[in-house]
Image: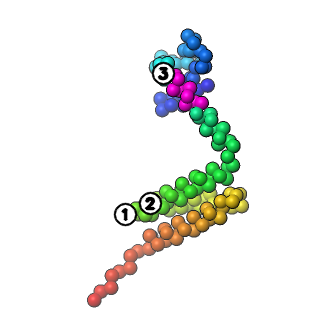
Amino acid sequence: MTLWTPDGERKIPPASAGDAATPSPAAGGPGPEEPELTPEEEEQVRVMAKELAEARARLLETEVATVLTNHALGIYELAAIHLTAERPNLDEARLAIDALAAIVENLAGRLGESEATLKGALHQVRMAYVQRARPEAPAASD
């Protein structure tokens, strides 16, 4: 098994590897430019791999509509953050709103019980965008 790290793929030695924990480069182990891991680092990699496997298993048990709803609400929040900033970034907000619309509108009828909530959120953030994008009314002159 391997684990992706910012430095590249790392081979995870078996938990019961003992002295044979360091595979040869021909077996996919560390090459000349890849430093070997200390026993502590190897244990950290094993723990991280186990946690990743557990997270993947939990994700497989979760309905996709639930995961999509969670991500869609994150996109909603992203749009709201850009709209409510002291200096709103309308271009960034519009991109987030368009991404939210792509999910809500293209998956209509497939998002389960949270679909109505997502449609409401999309409507709300679109209205907020229109309000923030509207130019300020000129001040009345005396």
Circle 1 packing at 10 Å, graded few (<14), some (14-19), many (20+), is: few
Q: Residue at x 53, y 59 (%)?
A: 76
Give the residue number, with chain letter if any, for mark 3. 40
Q: Main secondary structure of the magenta part?
A: helix
**What is the CA distance from the residue labelled 2 to the residue labelled 3?**
43 Å
Q: Are marks 2 and 3 in contact (CB under 8 Å)?
A: no
Please name the amino acid that badge 2 sits on: His
Question: Is 122 colored magenta in this rendering?
Answer: no
Please name the amino acid that badge 3 sits on: Glu
In which quadrant of the rendered view does residue 90 lie? bottom left
Give the residue number, with chain letter if any, for mark 2. 82
**What is the CA distance from the residue labelled 2 to the residue labelled 1?**
9 Å
Position of residue 106 in the picture relative to residue 76 (left or right): right
Pinpoint residue 15: horizontal percent, then vertical percent. 60, 20
In which quadrant of the rendered view does residue 25 lie? top right
Q: Residue at x 65, y 64 (%)?
A: 116
Circle 2 packing at 10 Å, graded few (<14), some (14-19), many (20+), is: some
Give the residue number, with chain letter if any, for mark 1. 86
Q: Which mark is residue 34?
A: none
Q: Residue at x 35, y 80 (%)?
A: 138
**What is the CA distance from the residue labelled 3 to the residue labelled 1?**
47 Å
Q: Residue furthest right?
A: 109
- Element marked by disc 1: loop
Pinpoint residue 133: horizontal percent, then vertical percent. 44, 70
Pinpoint residue 82: horizontal percent, then vertical percent. 44, 60
10 in relation to 94, above or below: above
Magenta segment boundaries in residue numbering: 42-50
Q: Residue at x 56, y 15 (%)?
A: 21
Q: Residue furthest bottom?
A: 142
Point out the image quarter for the N terminus: top right
* Residue 56 in view, yes or no: yes
